[in-house]
Amino acid sequence: MADKETTQMPPKYDPQAVEAGRYDEWLDEGLFKPSGDQKAHPYSIVIPPPNVTGKLHLGHAWDTTLQDMIIRQKRMQGFDTLWLPGMDHAGIATQAKVEAKLREQGISRYDLGREKFIEKVWEWKDEYANTIKTQWGKLGLSLDYSRERFTLDSGLSDAVKKVFVSLYKKGLIYRGEYIINWDPQARTALSDIEVIHEDDKGAFYHIKYKFADGETTLDGKDYIEIATTRPETMMGDTAIAVNPHDERYKNVVGKKVILPLANREIPIITDQHADPEFGTGAVKITPAHDPNDFLVGNRHNLERINTMNEDATMNEKAGKYEGLDRFEARKAMIQDLQDQDLMIAIDPIVHSVGHSERTGVQVEARLSTQWFVKMKPLAEQALKNQMTDDKVDFVPDRFEKTFSQWMENVHDWVISRQLWWGHQIPAWYNKKTGELYVDEQPPKDIENWEQDKDVLDTWFSSALWPFSTMGWPNTEAADFKRYFPTDTLVTGYDIIFFWVSRMIFQSLEFTGRRPFKNVLLHGLIRDEEGRKMSKSLGNGIDPMDVIDQYGADALRWFLSNGSTPGQDIRFSYKKMDSAWNFINKIWNASRYVIMNLGEMTKPELPDKASWDLADRWILSRLNQTVAQVTEQFEKFNFGEAGRALYDFIWNDFCDWYIEMSKEVLTGADEQAKNKTRNVLAYVLDQTLRLLHPIMPFVTEKIWLTMPHVGDSLVVAAYPETHADFDDQKAIDDMSRLIELIKAVRNIRAEANAPMSSPIDVLIKTDNGALQTMFEANRDYIDRFVHPKTMVIGADVQAPKLAMTGIVSDAELYVPLAELVDLNEEAARLQKEVEKFEAEVSRAQKKLANEKFVANAPADVVEAERQKQTENESKLQATKDRLAALKAEQ
């Protein structure tokens, strides 16, 4: 690390100045690489690889900030940590982006050809990969770039081929004709979870299918009525189905009807698929254009007539409509049906229609020959593993049910994509015989074979990410042996199906182990109104813009402090202002401490015998905070950890201990000054270490400005608790002292008596220990209360004209004869009575709750009982004082 920072800290926190160049220094020093200490316990995370389709958004910033916090803390705790970076080629998503860019230039991928087009995609990848890495740097992510991977690099390609061939040889990958989701713009198959259903305006078209013999009638009509939302598929109809138990149609089953516009005869059959309660109860069967109809066709051996091309234009099977776009064909068919008196009615509806997640176009159900993974045995293995000690722990645990339900109801996974960008399927067809050859290596007589043109679904390669990035299939690879299985995966709950589930079953199948011990699932970042951020709403926030304005540390603090596992958070600039203000508070407090350290070369905690109440209290509170933050990090409750830090830093350290230190540092006792300087330095040092995983830049800057204790916080030791710091009495005494000071300040505020105006303070208490503690800390009371005189004792009498404060085990009176209105004082005390009554009532209800008493930790229940006792005492004392005051009026 660079030489020690200058001891001069500007009076105002400037994030740009603080963060400039720091990340490059960390990289130059190699601080993010594993320690290599074989005695240390390994801890690894693989980054969810962002798609090389564009810049990172706030969701990425949230996701990666949480990972960085975890890995930074573990590194400081002495673990041999690896956080492995990388990116996903994102097949259809990236290809769609590049094709859109080419369309703007009037070019299609077919104009370029496969090889040239792939070159264009690699250019895109390089550009956006560099952008993403720059953004990672601005966020301060402590990634080991020496191990960076890409889902299309050679090592991962070897892993993909091995997995494909292995599953194929085990009969878990097969090739077959099936109805799949088809994206006509990208001209590729889609899996079910790549289809987004949205409400579209449409219609039910009621059409006459006339009986072929010219004699059959149904309710006196020479036709059977069929309602469809997709008349453009009519030319592929091969039957009409009715339910076998539908009495309305029993006399026409077996008859034939003439397919409108095609003049082709098709039969009326019975099948359970036809629902008597829906529409007319009779449905047209189009096996090549509907997944349910495909199954009906299989049961009845019906012909499959595909009437559409890959781009959703009509083909030669569509007769006169050949060449028309599907929606143009619909309009033409509707007009022809109306002209031929075959259209009964058109009923407008709004219905859910599938759209491609990537291109946004309406998806077609299309008969196609594709490659599939047989999911049932893989899913059963994953479910069975969740009953073992090697299970994946979901955080929050409710998401395990989401995972299990999907696995229990999973369909075979269509893995082939009709794209050019991706892992080309390792299958070859003999040019003469059509023989299929599947292997990791191409056939030796390659000139006689042609490789399958399809590529694999992006999720097929990213499902291998936790182990393929570690060197698998070489099971002797050093990283694979040391860092796999990984420890924690952090990702959004919205990709449990896409990615988390697939990583689990592929890892179990090929390594025999879970891919990660924990999966921490977070929600979505929404705008201030709770809306999902989207281009259409124009409410998206670029995290880099936020960093430019507030700094990375402020953004990271907001993202961590608002973090509850599994929950969404709302972004607002007001919250960013608060985050910046908090860091500025830390900056100013640190500046005060450093300016007062004098010639100190290294902070050393003084002998415990010299600690006064403030020292014992702040070190005990530090100990509690270390314990709380460490525990909450382990539970991934980063919001709770943040609250504990905020409370300690802002309230205890800044507002009280630093203010109390001024009393000592402005005094003449050099020994006391030296003691206080060292306590200040020690507490600041430990606090910066606690904060570092969350806000690495500012903590590093401040820490290196202090008397030298190390080269970088990145590899400094994380704070631990010390039993000799625990001092409940100091915490209780300081609580009483602060309560007293606040009570007098409140009285000053109520009476409009500024700190400059002299006041007398009378403190009545029968508690000898409390009286002794107050007497011993008169200097602090003087500093914060500024009394002219102060009397403490059991025999203190309440003056007639005085304002009263009730604190634990004591009453205080401030004689302000010229300022006190007895009626106003009585009204104020009545409000205090009502406040304490509410507190007592709340505690009574809580302690009467059997579930709370039985399930809450014993110390929490005991604290609640103590709180109730204290408030009952305060309530009684306030009532007594109010009664006395009324007697005086």
Image (cartoon, rainbow, N blue to C red):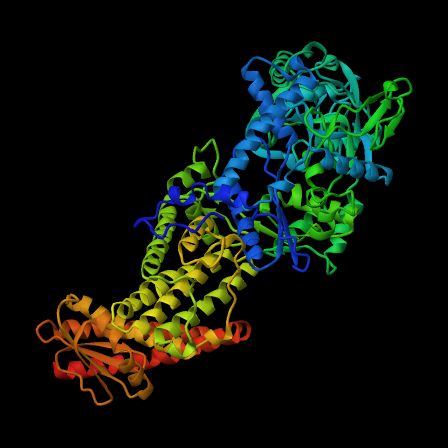
Q: Residue at x 77, y 36 (%)?
A: 158
Tell me if residue 406 comes above or below residue 850 in the rendering.
above
Q: Is residue 526 left or right of residue 473?
A: left
- Taking the view exactly as shown, the residue that stands out farthest to the bottom is 795
Q: Determine the residue located farthest toward the right in the rendered image.
A: 433
Judge left or right: residue 612 versus residue 625: left
| Direction top: furthest residue | 320
**Residue 611 rendering spot, x and y as whole percentages:** 38, 76
In the rendered image, the vertical position of residue 526 relative to residue 344, given as above or below: below
> Could you say which quadrant of the image residue 127 lies in?
top right
- Residue 49, picture quadrant: top right
Q: Tell me which residue sits at (59%, 44%) in the image.
A: 494
Provide residue 116's location: percent of width, then percent of height.
Answer: 66, 17
- Residue 294 is situated, as x and y percent measured from the top left of the image, at 77, 30
Judge from the rendering whether residue 296 lies leftward or rightward of residue 22; answer left or right.
Answer: right
Front-lying residue, 576 or 836: 576
Closer to the camera in the image, 293 or 162: 162
Which residue is more in the foreground, 283 or 96? 96
Q: Quadrant of the C terminus?
A: bottom left
- Residue 375 visible (yes or no): yes
Q: Residue 491 in the image: x percent, y percent?
A: 59, 46
Instruction: Identify whether 270 is placed above or below 13.
Output: above
Q: Nearer the viewer, residue 3 or 246?
A: 3
